[in-house]
Structure formats: C-alpha cells, structure tokens
Image (cartoon, grey):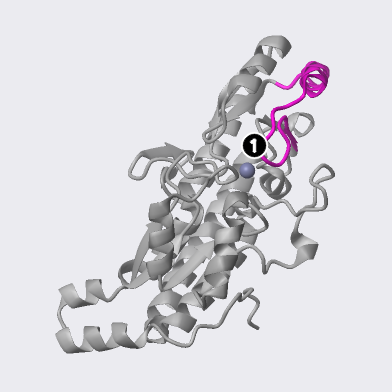
C-alpha cells in the first residue's frame, strides 16, 4: 500500500541523470549522478543517508541544534530547494515558517514529501493547547519513525527505480537496528521507578517519546518554542515537582535553557542534562551507555543519548 502523502507527481528529471551516468561510466560519474536530495531536519537527513548510501547526495538545510519551529529559509536555501530532484520535510507544521515556500515549490511541480503527514491519525497526538494541530515530534517514538523511514524508502525507490535493491536492502538493515535500539531503550527506561517517570523539559517535544517509553511529559513552553512560558505555569510546575519528588528535569539542545534553570532553582530538582529535542547532535561525536555505542549526529544517537541522560539522572541504583 502506498501510504506516503504525495504532494505532486513529477514527470521528468531522472533521465538526464541516468544518461550522464551511463555515458561516463566512472565512479566520479556515479557520484556526480547521485540523486540530489534536499531535507529540512537533521533526523530526516540522517534517515535519507542511511537508506540511500552512495546513491544519494543529501543536503540538509538545518544543522545540529537548529530549532525547526523558528527556522526561516535563507535565499541560499531557496536555491538549494529549486535544484533538488526530491525534497523531504517533516510536515505536521513543524517547519512553520517554511510552509509558503513548500506550497510554492509544490505548485512548480517539485517532488516534495512530508514524511510524517502520512502516519495514520489514530497514532498521532493532538495536545489540548495546540488549536487542533497534531504534535509534529513523531521521531520521539522509534516505531513511528520506522514508518517514516519506510515512507522515505518508497519515495526514493519511486524516483530512482534502478536503486530499488540498494534502498530496500539498506532500509531493512536500518529498521532492524532501530528495532534493537528501541528494545534497549525500553529495558533501560524500566530502571526509573514507576511513580517518578515524569519528564520535565523546555517545550513539548517529547509526547511521542514519553508514550513510547512510558513517561508522562510536561513541557513548560508548550508545543512550539515561539512563545515563552507564563509565570503561573512555572509556579505550577515547581509545586508539581516538589509534590512528586521528581529528582531531575532537563534542558534541550535547540531551546534556551533559561526557564528550566529557574524551575530547577525554585524546585530543588537538579538539571539532569541536555536532551536532544528537534535536532541531532554533532556528527562524529561518539558516546556509549549500557553496551550501546552511538554517534550523536545520528538518530540512533538521539535516542541513545536521551535514554542515557534520563536513566543516569533518574534511575535509583
Ligand atoms: Zn519542537
């Protein structure tokens, strides 16, 4: 079943690529002929690289630590997007300030995919304070992210049928790694006592993550980072932390830590560390925890680091 939301069906683009590849026939030509993919978030960039390997040339617009809610496309981004053979973005209004640009590209006939838009709405979360919008942070749940990986794989196969075997094989191996990582995460998060499985962070990026790993989630700034937390909310959260005796709260890599620092001072809960929320970490920086080793610039590093940070500061030995 084809479940990826397709904005537009392109009629051309791949043929010149294949011709130049066949005529030149060298490894240089193969690289030059790699499918030019432009992505928004670092999570999507990583997934496309894992699925596509050498067949794709991935250009991610947002780097490590970049907040996609606030990201405004630069003139150079518009050029990159117009040169792309295929574009992937998260959707569900995560990239709120790029919506007009995406619809313009779509009208121009550019193949452009919102990887999260095709997830069955029964699996999506609609928080109370979001004026009816779905929560876009679907990568927090490895099972939902695997669905997005499958969607991306289908789109790559459709645009580059000669690479079908490569994409399918890479995708299968990658999905197995994500399943193993999820099982490892479940095992570790179970070390935090049941009545303290409450995750307090800057903004509501962790609803899916919390669902996946059995944590209640409280984000002090709400679903987007656009507005600051009101004072009354801060006071309520301080009282809540004291009442539940929550040992640690967390700052996020892509959001200012000021509010969380204040809540930490007022409540006595320590800052348990920095979680990755809407962006991956630095590529090539390795970390390990409980037998798992991961690159912080990958999605596996996103899950691994967050689990390690939470378990290290909240689990009782
Ligand atoms: Zn967010």
Quadrant location of the C terminus? top right
Q: Is residue 205 visible?
A: yes
Q: Is residue 52 left or right of residue 224?
A: left
Q: Say which residue appears at 57% left-offset and 32% top-offset.
A: 255
Q: Is residue 226 magenta?
A: yes
Q: Is residue 114 visible?
A: no
What percent of the width, then of the height, locates residue 237?
A: 78, 22
Q: Say which residue appears at 70% left-offset and 39% top-offset.
A: 204
Q: Return the residue nearer the eye: 126 or 286.
A: 126
Q: Return the residue nearer the eye: 84 or 44.
A: 84
Quadrant housing residue 69: top right
Q: Is residue 157 magenta?
A: no
Q: Is residue 229 left or right of residue 278?
A: right
User: Is ligand 1 within 8 Å of the beta carbon of the residue shown at mark 1?
Assistant: yes
Image quarter for ligand 1: top right
What percent of the width, then of the height, locates residue 312?
A: 56, 28
Q: Which residues are magenta?
A: 217-246
Task: Report which residue position mark 1 lands on.
Answer: 225
Q: Where 90 falls versus 232 (above or below)? A: below
């Amino acid at each position: 079943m084809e479940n990826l939301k397709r904005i537009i069906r392109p009629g051309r683009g791949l043929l010149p690529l294949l011709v130049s590849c066949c005529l030149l026939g060298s490894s240089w030509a193969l690289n030059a002929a790699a499918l030019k993919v432009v992505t928004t978030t670092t999570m999507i960039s990583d997934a496309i690289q894992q699925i596509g390997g050498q067949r794709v040339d991935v250009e991610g617009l947002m780097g490590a630590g970049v907040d996609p809610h606030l990201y405004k496309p630069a003139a150079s981004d518009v050029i990159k997007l117009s040169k792309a053979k295929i574009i992937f973005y998260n959707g569900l209004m995560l990239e709120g300030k790029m919506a007009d640009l995406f619809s313009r590209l779509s009208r121009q006939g550019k193949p452009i995919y919102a990887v999260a838009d095709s997830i069955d709405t029964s699996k999506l979360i609609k928080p109370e304070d979001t004026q009816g919008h779905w929560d876009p942070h679907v990568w927090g749940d490895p099972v939902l992210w695997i669905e997005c990986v499958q969607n991306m794989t289908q789109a790559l196969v459709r645009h580059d049928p000669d690479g079908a075997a490569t994409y399918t094989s890479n995708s299968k191996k990658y999905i197995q790694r994500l399943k193993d990582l999820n099982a490892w995460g479940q095992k570790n998060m179970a070390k935090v006592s049941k009545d303290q499985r409450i995750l307090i962070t800057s903004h509501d990026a962790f609803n899916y993550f919390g669902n996946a790993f059995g944590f209640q989630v409280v984000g002090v700034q709400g679903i987007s980072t656009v507005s600051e937390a009101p004072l009354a909310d801060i006071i309520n959260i301080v009282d809540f932390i004291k009442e539940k005796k929550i040992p640690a709260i967390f700052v996020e890599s892509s959001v200012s830590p000021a509010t969380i620092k204040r809540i930490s001072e007022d409540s006595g809960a320590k800052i348990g560390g920095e979680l990755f929320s809407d962006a991956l970490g630095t590529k090539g920086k390795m970390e390990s925890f409980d037998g798992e080793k991961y690159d912080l610039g990958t999605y596996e590093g996103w899950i691994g680091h967050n689990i390690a940070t939470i378990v290290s500061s909240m689990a009782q030995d």
